[in-house]
Amino acid sequence: MTLTVEKIDDKEVKKISFDDNHFAKTLFGVNGENIKLIGNELEIEAGIRGNLILLQGENEKTEKAGWLLEDLYSLIKSGCQISKND
């Protein structure tokens, strides 16, 4: 997992990329439902482009999203199953 930060239209956007597309797809959920849920819960914009997740919003909230995604990705890679209820 790699995190980069860019400025787009004067707004900071965190981009998280994943090294394994299979695990990333599991993390994203069907039609990106897991990423949408994280975005809604943390009140940030969260979207998917290929194997990238784009996060935009208050810095503290996007950092929380990044930590959560990193933890979930690690769990998935270790063989755990996740669902939107987790």
Image: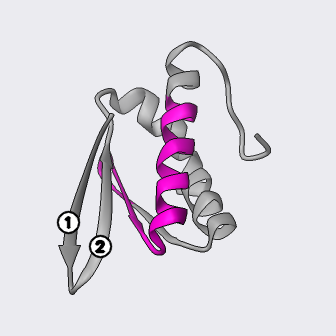
Residue found farthest to the top: 78
User: Could you say which disc has been placed on residue 47 in the image?
Assistant: none
Residue denoted by label 1: 6
Where residue 60 sits: x, y (%)? 51, 64
Mark 1 or mark 2, which is nearer the start of the sequence? 1
The stretch in magenta equals 48-73
Q: Secondary structure at mark 2?
A: strand
Label 2 crowding class (10 Å Cα cut-off): few <14, some 14-19, many 20+? some
Please count the marks in the image.
2
Where residue 6 sits: x, y (%)? 20, 66
Q: Residue at x 45, y 28 (%)?
A: 23
Quadrant location of the C terminus in the rendered image: top right
Indicate yes or no whether the magenta region holds residue 75. no
Residue 56, image quadrant: bottom left
Where residue 16 sits: x, y (%)? 33, 48
Where residue 31 sits: x, y (%)? 53, 55
Q: Secondary structure at mark 1?
A: strand
| 37 with respect to 1 (left or right) | right
Indicate yes or no whether the magenta region holds residue 54. yes
Q: Amino acid at mark 2?
A: Glu
Separation of disc 2 and disc 1 at Cα?
6 Å
Q: Between residues 49 and 30, which one lies in front from this camera angle?
A: 49
Q: Amino acid at mark 1?
A: Glu
Residue denoted by label 2: 12
Q: Between residues 64 and 37, which one lies in front from this camera angle?
A: 64
Quadrant location of the N terminus in the rendered image: top left
Task: Establish if 17 lies above or below 21.
Answer: below
Residue found farthest to the bottom: 9
**Circles 2 and 1: CB distance less than 8 Å?**
yes
